[in-house]
Amino acid sequence: QQQVKQSPQSLIVQKGGIPIINCAYENTAFDYFPWYQQFPGKGPALLIAIRPDVSEKKEGRFTISFNKSAKQFSLHIMDSQPGDSATYFCAANIQGAQKLVFGQGTRLTINP
Amino acid sequence: EAQVTQNPRYLITVTGKKLTVTCSQNMNHEYMSWYRQDPGLGLRQIYYSMNVEVTDKGDVPEGYKVSRKEKRNFPLILESPSPNQTSLYFCASSLGVYSGANVLTFGAGSRLTVL
């Protein structure tokens, strides 16, 4: 079964800190790894994504680190702000298909 | 504005009373999908559609039906809702398998409570 395991389930960080959310997958049949951000009362929205031939991707304060051999990838948020408080989902796209497998989600709170 | 629109946003119903959650997108997307979001379980796919008249089961299809008669609409039907279908539901769409990346646009969600 294709799975993506995400941790932690919840995370509280002080403003300016660097929250890190981790994901691990169990097989190699994934070809695209996006992160989605969800604010309360809204649907998830694409935040940043990476392909497995790249080890790191940075967009503004958000960075994905990808470790292909360990089958792990993580999201780092630099200089975190209260406005970053949201639920974050990692996901993996099944190679050759139009299917995203989502992690369990992380509720992130950035305290002022 | 490019968007996915779901209705109703909130619904409380009783066991066995058929209901439909509508979903419409204005981006001419080929691919549409339904997900349910439950605490600790993330987003799980219910059904998806690669194009008009083409639908297939996702990971948790039991108790749900869908149809895709028009490209823009993809309603989710609960023929006989049960309490275990109490959840937050999301409709999503994307350009399709040839777009190079599976970038989903989600609706705002429909919170369903089955008593």
Image: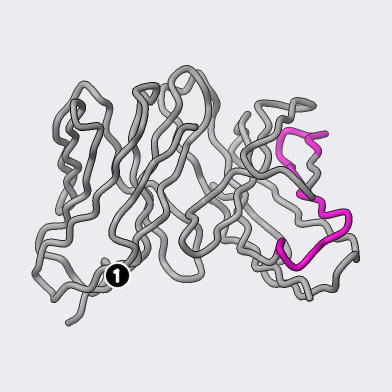
Is A13 drawn above or below residue B44 in the view shown?
below
Write the residue at 75% across / 53% down: B22
**Residue under pointer 1:** A85
Q: Chain of mark 1?
A: A
User: Residue B83: within the magenta?
Assistant: yes
Is B20 drawn above or below residue A112 in the view shown?
above
**In which quadrant will I find the C terminus of chain B?**
bottom right
Amino acid type, label 1: Ser
**Magenta segment range?**
B67-85
The 10 Å Cα crowd at callout 1, few under 14, some 14 to 19, many 20 or more, is: many
Residue B26 placement (x, y as % from top left): 63, 43
Left or right placement of residue B33 versus residue B65 in this view: left
Write the residue at 34% across / 61% down: A106
Residue B12 placement (x, y as % from top left): 76, 75
Q: Which color scheme is applied? A: one colour
> Where on the picture, by quarter, is residue B46?
top right
Residue A3 placement (x, y as % from top left): 43, 38
Left or right placement of residue A20 versus residue B73 in this view: left
Q: Nearer the viewer, residue B45 or B5?
A: B45
